[in-house]
Each structure stands twice: as C-alpha cells, then as structure tokens.
Amino acid sequence: MKKLIIMLFCALILVACSSEDGADSKSANKNSEEESNTESKGDKTEEADESAAVQFRNVGMEIKGSTIQLSGEAKAKDDTFFYKFEQGDTKIVKETSVKLEKNEQGWGSFQLELELTQKVREAQVMPVITLYDKKEDGTIVNKNYFPVDLRNL
C-alpha cells in the first residue's frame, strides 16, 4: 500500500512539474531574451524570481494513527519555505513557514507532523498538503502538492 501511495505522489509531482515547465517555457525564453537585452545595455534589473525559489527532494509521507508525517529535504534561497494543509476550501492548517538549516550543499531537512481529525477523515474531498515559496511581494511560487489518501485507513 505504501508503494502505491508513493507511486501516486511521484506521478502527481511529475505531471505537475511537466505541465508547469511546458506552460512557462515560452515566457521563460522571452524573459531570457529581455534580460540579455537589458544587460547588454548596461542596465541591471532586479529579478523577483531569483529572490524566491525552492526545490524539494526525497519527500516521503507516512500516516501513523491520526498523524501525517511529511519529511524530506528542501533548498531555498532564503532558507525558508511555506506549507498549508487544505481540504477543498477548508484550511486545516493555515500558511506556516519552515526554517531550514542548510548542509554544505545547501539542502536542509524538514519534517512536518499534521494531525488528522475525524472530520477530515470522514470528508469526501481528499486533503492536500502544499509546499511552496513566496516572492517579496507575497506571490506564491514553486507550488508542490501532496494529496493525502485516506481511503485505506
């Protein structure tokens, strides 16, 4: 069962990453050309995207009793990322920041423990944990979704 859940998460992550990359490739190329043009003129532009970036790896989820444990490694420019836990339009855990302590390669380990209430277990909508970063203006970037499959609990 754990293998099925892990495979489901991996597939979801791959689909989310590939669709985001495909949709943004044209705008990324255009932005790259614009940056080259402004730099060649001697102008330095401040890149908001550079100030907010996060990567995740080795993320795993385990459900023990009424607790969800989500752990992994993250690399963030400002050593901080955010998460929230939602079920449909209901916020189970509002936006919370996680401070990372980096290793030599710039990666920091994290472990989140989230409680499952009976109300969450009985709902028809699958709860989702979202990990992300934010730009200075508050815009959310690099969203990563982790659905919590409660069907076999």
Image (spheres, rainbow, N blue to C red):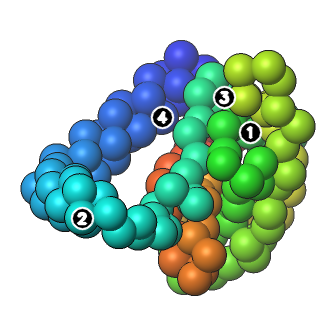
If you read the primary sequence from the N terminus, does the residue marked by circle 3 or circle 2 appear first?
A: 2
At a point 27% along the width and 52% down the height, the residue shown is: 20
Circles 3 and 1, Cβ within 8 Å, touching? The answer is yes
Residue marked by disc 4: 9
Quadrant in which the C terminus is drawn: top right
Q: What element carries label 4?
A: helix
Please name the residue that numbered disc 2 is placed on. 41
SS of the residue under disc 2: loop
Residue 103 higher or lower than 70, as above or below: above
In which quadrant of the rendered image does the N terminus lie? top right
Query: What residue lies at 44% left-to-right and 23% top-to-bottom?
Result: 7
Of badges 2 and 4, the one in the foreground is: 2
Marks 2 and 1 close (CB-CB < 8 Å): no
Q: Where is residue 122 in the image (x, y as percent from the top left)?
A: 66, 64
Where on the picture, by quarter, is residue 83? bottom right
Name the secondary structure under disc 3.
strand
